[in-house]
Image: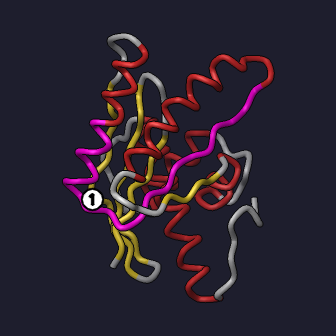
């Protein structure tokens, strides 16, 4: 049994999803989002760090997976701000020595919906099916669960085949 914390970083809302994986069976443990909409940027980043640190203490994950930043040349400032939130999330995991896996959005969409260009609603729908969930999910929480599920699929394939898939698919 492995507990995985998936993170969808954001400077205003950071989504999180915690799953338990046994072989290729996955179970939803917790999901939601950290609201960091108030305060200066340093205060918001601290809130994200503290929120993720508390989740790590509460759920004791063995592994963390995080979505990579999509770099858009049109809005580089947004990418830089998102990168700060992502860095804080990585630090929250690193302070406890947890391994961190990173996945591009196209990899996540491919793993969850079978299409690297899937729409958000398709991914959200598949997350609910894969985790046998009935309740509605916030977009941030759904995205974070998709990251965790992607990591569960990749680690399961690695364990079965012994093949390293880092950066080699998507």
Of 90 and 144, which appears nearest the observer?
Answer: 90
| Count of numbered tags | 1
Q: Residues within 10 Å of mark 1 (few under 14, many from 20)?
A: some
* Model colouring: secondary structure
Q: Which residue is mark 1?
A: 29
* Horizontal side of residue 83 vs 22, given as left or right: right
**Magenta stretch, residue numbers:** 50-72
Q: Residue furthest left?
A: 58
The residue at the point 48 percent across, 41 percent down is: 8
User: Relative to 67, is 150 above or below?
Assistant: below
Q: Quadrant of residue 46?
A: top left
The quadrant of the image that shows the C terminus is bottom right
Q: Quadrant of residue 102?
A: bottom right
The residue at the point 65 percent across, 46 percent down is: 105
**Residue 135 at x, y percent in the picture:** 30, 46
User: Relative to 114, is 40 above or below?
Assistant: above
**Residue 42 at x, y percent in the picture:** 40, 19
**Residue 112 at x, y percent in the picture:** 58, 58
Of 100 and 24, which appears nearest the observer?
Answer: 100
The residue at the point 58 percent across, 88 percent down is: 160
* The stretch drawn in magenta includes residue 41: no
Element class at badge 1: strand
């Amino acid at each position: 049994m492995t507990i995985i914390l998936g993170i969808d970083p954001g400077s205003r809302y950071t989504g999180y999803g915690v799953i338990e994986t046994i072989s290729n069976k996955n179970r939803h443990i917790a999901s939601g989002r950290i609201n960091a909409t108030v305060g200066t940027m340093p205060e918001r980043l601290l809130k994200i760090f503290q929120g993720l640190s508390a989740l790590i203490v509460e759920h004791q994950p063995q592994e963390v997976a995080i979505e990579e930043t999509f770099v858009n040349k049109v809005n580089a400032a947004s990418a830089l701000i998102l990168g700060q939130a992502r860095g804080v999330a990585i630090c929250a995991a690193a302070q406890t020595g947890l391994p961190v896996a990173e996945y591009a959005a196209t990899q996540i969409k491919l793993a969850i919906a079978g299409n690297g260009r899937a729409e958000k609603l398709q991914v959200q729908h598949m997350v609910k099916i894969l985790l046998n969930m009935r309740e509605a999910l916030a977009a941030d929480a759904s995205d974070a669960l998709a990251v965790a599920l992607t990591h569960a699929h990749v680690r399961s394939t690695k364990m079965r085949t012994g093949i390293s898939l880092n950066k080699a698919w998507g």
